[in-house]
């Protein structure tokens, strides 16, 4: 009877452990004029980061294990902080990672803020996060300003895009 049950549940098991088809990351970006800095929330699939770390170290890790280990956590921080670049005019804006949070949808939320910087007329962004690991990775930025928003999508070959000015 046990072999029969195994055969019956094998297709369902194979579906459950198969990697997901889409690799997505979302960045919500806003300029805080009171603090004169950019603030951002980055949302990425937690098991994608766990997969990258596990593969690198040839050991299975969950996102919770990674976040509790200072060395593994630092590796993830570096992946995330180098996964996008914002230019305020011609000046690169540097971000600090403020906090991590996981949610029940299997996502890692990363809260970031920039150093104080005056807002200039043009913004551009590069967002290659995880594209070296997942060529089908799709990244989307939502920029918020003055109660308005715009979205910009990045694929593997998108190097740098202008963020439209919101009036």
Image (cartoon, rainbow, N blue to C red):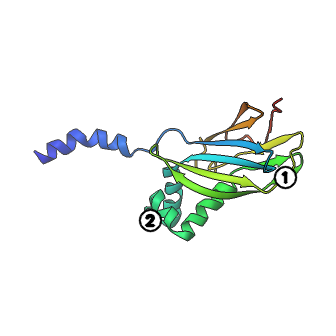
Q: Residues within 10 Å of mark 1 (few under 14, many from 20)?
A: some
As drawn, 96 above or below 8: below
* Side of 21 where 140 appears, left or right: right
On the question of residue 138 being in view, the answer is yes
Which circle marks residue 35 in the picture? none
Most foreground residue, 100 or 123: 100
Q: Residues within 10 Å of mark 2 (few under 14, many from 20)?
A: few
**Quarter holding residue 150:** top right
Local secondary structure at mark 1: loop
Most foreground residue, 106 or 18: 106
Q: Residue 76, image x and y in percent? A: 59, 60
Q: Residue 18, image x and y in percent? A: 41, 44
The CA distance from mark 1 to mark 2 is 41 Å
Q: Are marks 1 and 2 in contact (CB under 8 Å)?
A: no
At a point 62% along the width and 60% down the height, the residue shown is 77
Q: Residue 159, image x and y in percent? A: 76, 43
**Quadrant containing the C terminus in the rendered view:** top right
At a point 65% along the width and 58% down the height, the residue shown is 98
As drawn, 46 above or below 153: below
**Quarter holding residue 10:** top left
On the question of residue 128 being in view, the answer is no
Q: Residue 128, image x and y in percent? A: 69, 47
Local secondary structure at mark 2: loop
Instruction: Return the disc, 1 or 2, that comes first in the chain's sequence.
Output: 2
* Side of 124 where 142 appears, left or right: left
Q: Residue furthest front?
A: 34
Say which residue label 2 marks.
59
At a point 82% along the width and 48% down the height, the residue shown is 87
At a point 81% along the width and 45% down the height, the residue shown is 33
Q: Residue furthest left?
A: 1
Which circle marks residue 117 in the picture? 1
């Amino acid at each position: 009877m046990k072999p029969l049950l195994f055969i019956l549940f094998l297709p369902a098991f194979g579906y459950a452990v198969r990697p997901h088809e889409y690799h997505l990351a979302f960045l919500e970006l806003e300029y805080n004029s009171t603090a004169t800095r950019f603030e951002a929330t980055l949302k990425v699939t937690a098991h994608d980061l766990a997969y990258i770390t596990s593969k690198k170290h040839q050991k299975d890790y969950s996102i919770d294990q990674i976040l509790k280990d200072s060395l593994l956590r630092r590796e993830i921080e570096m992946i995330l902080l180098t996964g996008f670049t914002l230019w305020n005019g011609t000046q690169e804006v540097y971000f600090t990672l403020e906090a991590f949070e996981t949610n029940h949808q299997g996502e890692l939320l990363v809260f970031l803020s920039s150093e104080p910087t005056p807002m200039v007329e043009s913004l551009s962004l590069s967002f290659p996060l995880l594209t070296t690991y997942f060529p089908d990775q799709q990244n989307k930025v939502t920029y918020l300003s003055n109660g308005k928003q715009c979205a910009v999508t990045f694929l593997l070959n998108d190097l740098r895009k202008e963020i439209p000015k919101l009036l």
